Amino acid sequence: MLEVVSRNGGHLASSLGAVEIAMALAEVFDPAKDRVVWDVGHQAYAWKLLTGRNEDFDSLRKLGGVSGFPNPAESVADAAVAGHAGVALSVASGLAAARDRKRSGEHVIAVVGDAAIANGVSLEALNNCAAATTKMIVVLNDNEMSISRPTGSVARLLGRLITGVRYNRVKMAAEKAGHALRLTFLRGIYHSIERRIKSLFLGNAFFEQFGLRYIGPVDGHDLQALKDAFTVAKEDKRSVLVHVVTKKGHGYAPAEKNPTQWHGVGPFDLIPKEDCDRLATSKRGWSDAFGDALRDLARKDSRIVAITAAMKDGTGLVDFATEFPDRFFDVGIAEEHMVAFAGGLAAGGLRPVVAVYSTFLQRAVDQVMHDVCLSNQPVVFCVDRAGVVGADGATHQGVFDIAMLRCLPNITICQPKDENDLAALLREAIGRNGPTVIRYPRGKVPVVVEAVPTVSKGETARFAIWATGDWLAKANEVAKLLGGCEVVHARYLKPFDSATLERQRKAGMTIVSIENGSVAGGFGESIGADVKFGWPDEFIPHGSQVELEKKYGLDAASIADAIRRRGL
Ligand SMILES: Cc1ncc(C[n+]2csc(CCOP(=O)(O)OP(=O)(O)O)c2C)c(N)n1
C-alpha cells in the first residue's frame, strides 16, 4: 500500500488505520456473499488488496486502473459505490432489508468513521435501522480524527466512551489496591472515575436506544480481538455496533504523526528526509489563493465569517481559522446543515462564506434553494474542485454544480480566471445583497491570464470562444491554433454578458463554449452556444486531469480539430 501510494498518490492515513479491520472482516465474513459497505471508501485499500485487486494494485487511481474507492463494477466484494460520506448505514440498511425480504441470509456490514457517523444521513439511518431491518452490523472505526480534528457532540460522546474504558482499567487497579482508598487524594480520583464510568454507560445507551447492541471499544490493531468481536456480532441475532479504536496512519510514522497532512497525498518519497517536508513545499493552489483573499477581506469587514463541513485543510481555511477563531465554523461532515446554518447567519446580518467542494455541495442543493436563494440571503459559496478533479474519480468529479445551481432564481454564478480575479470576485460577492457562487478548480492558480483574441483590428472574427475560468488559457491556445477568433472570459456565468453575445450574433459569429463542467445543463447551454465543449453525459472515471481531457477530446489540440472539422 505504501509503495503504490508513494508512486500514485492516494488516501493513505485512513487506509493504513483500517488494515486490521479489513483483514478481520475478510476472515470472519465471506467477501463474495456477505455485503461490506465502506463509508466514503477512502479507507478500503487493504480490503481491495484482500479481495482480488492485489495483482492490479499498481494501477491504483490511474486511468483504466483500480479505483481509489469501492465500486461494485470493479469487484463483487464492493457492495456499493462509495466516495461521499455518511451514506453507508443507509445503503447497508437497504441491503439488509432486501435480504430480509428474500430470506437470503447474508450478513450486511457497514464500516463507518467517527466523523461520518455524525453526518445527518448516518443519523437518519440510525433512527430508521431498527424499524427497517432485522439485523445489520455497524463497524464504527474510531480514530478520533476526521480529516482534521472532528468537532461536535458526537465526537465528544465517542471520546467519553474510549476514555471511560481506560478509566475502567484504572479503577480496577485502584480497587485492587483497596486500602489505599482511605487516602483522600486517591478517593478524589476514585470519584472522578465513577463519574466517567457513568458517562460510559450513557454512551452505550446511546447506541442501544437505536436498537444496536454495543460491543467495544475494541483495539482496532489487535487482529484477534477484532476477529472475536466480529464473530460475536455475526452470531448475535440482533443488530450490533462494534466500536473499534484505531490510529490513523498506523504503521507509517510520518502519517501517524501528522494524519491530517497524510489523509490524501500526492506521490512522495517513501522514506522522507524529514516528515512531510515535500507536502509543506507543495505549489500554491486555488484553495490557498481563496484562503488568503478571504483573510484580507475579513480584516476589513467584521461581518465576514467562514464555514466548512470538515474540509478546513482542503478548502484553504487553516490560516483563517487561526487568525479568526471566533469567526470560523467547522460544522463536521454536514453539508445540508452547513448551508441552512449559513442562511441563518446571513439573515442575522453576517456575511457567511461557505467553502465547499463542488461534489459535496450536491448534498445541500435543497438548502441552497430553500434557505438561501428563496429569501435572497447574501451567502457566498466558494465552490472548490469545480471541474474534473482527476484521480479521485467518478464520485468526486465536480462537473454538475453549474447545471444544478444555474436554474435557481436570485443566484449569481461566476468563475475567476486567475488569482487576482478570484480576489476581485470575492470582494464583489461580499458586497452583493444576494447569494453568489464562485467556482474554481483543483490545481495550481495562475497569477494573471488574459483573453487573447486572434483577429486583427477592424477584421470580424469567424467565431467566438466563450471560456469559463480555468479553461480560458485553453481557449487562448485553441484561438491561436485556428486564428480569426474572439475569446471571451465568461467571468459571470449567471447573469452572463448578454450585450457581448448579442453583438457577436449580429456580426454572424459562430458561438463556441468551453467549460470545465457538464455540457448537459451547463454554461454553453445557457448562452445557446452553437458548439459546446465540456464533459459529456456520463460519469467521468479516474485518471489524471490531463489524460481525461485527452480521452474526452477536451485538450486544446482536440478542440481545435473538432472546430476545424465543422468547417469553421
Ligand atoms: C459528503 C462528504 N463531505 C466531505 C467529504 C470529504 N471527506 C472525505 S474523508 C473525510 C473524513 C472522514 O472521517 P472519518 O469518517 O472519521 O473517517 P477516517 O478518514 O478518519 O477513517 C471527509 C470530510 C466526503 N467524502 N463526503
Image: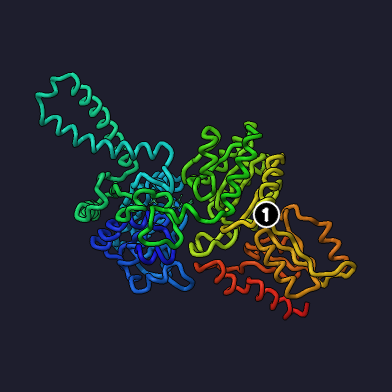
> Where is 139 relative to 544, above or below?
above
> Which percent across, then down, holds residue 375?
67, 39
Identify the coloring: rainbow
User: Does 475 sit left or right of 112 as displayed?
Assistant: right
Residue drawn at 57 percent across, 74 percent down? 551
Q: Residue at x 30, y 63 (%)?
A: 34
- Residue 417 placement, left or right of 284: right
- In front: 462, or 110? 462
Q: Is residue 535 left or right of residue 153?
A: right
Q: Quadrant of the C terminus?
A: bottom right
Residue behind mark 1: 415
Where is residue 433? Give x, y as percent.
Answer: 71, 39
Mark 1: secondary structure: loop
User: Who's the residue at 62% across and 35% down the image?
Assistant: 299
Q: Nearer the viewer, residue 176 or 287?
A: 287
Residue pushed farthest right?
A: 458
Amino acid residing under circle 1: Gln
Give the image quarter of residue 450. Answer: bottom right
Image quadrant where residue 206 sits = top left
Ligand 1 has an atom within 8 Å of the beta carbon of the residue at disc 1 = no
Tell me residue 518's x, y (percent): 62, 64
Q: Is residue 393 above or below residue 203?
A: below
Please state the horizontal and vertical placement of residue 213, each as a whole percent of the image.
27, 45
Residue 235 seen in render: no
Q: Total label count?
A: 1
Label 1 crowd bin: few (<14), some (14–19), many (20+), radius 10 Å: many
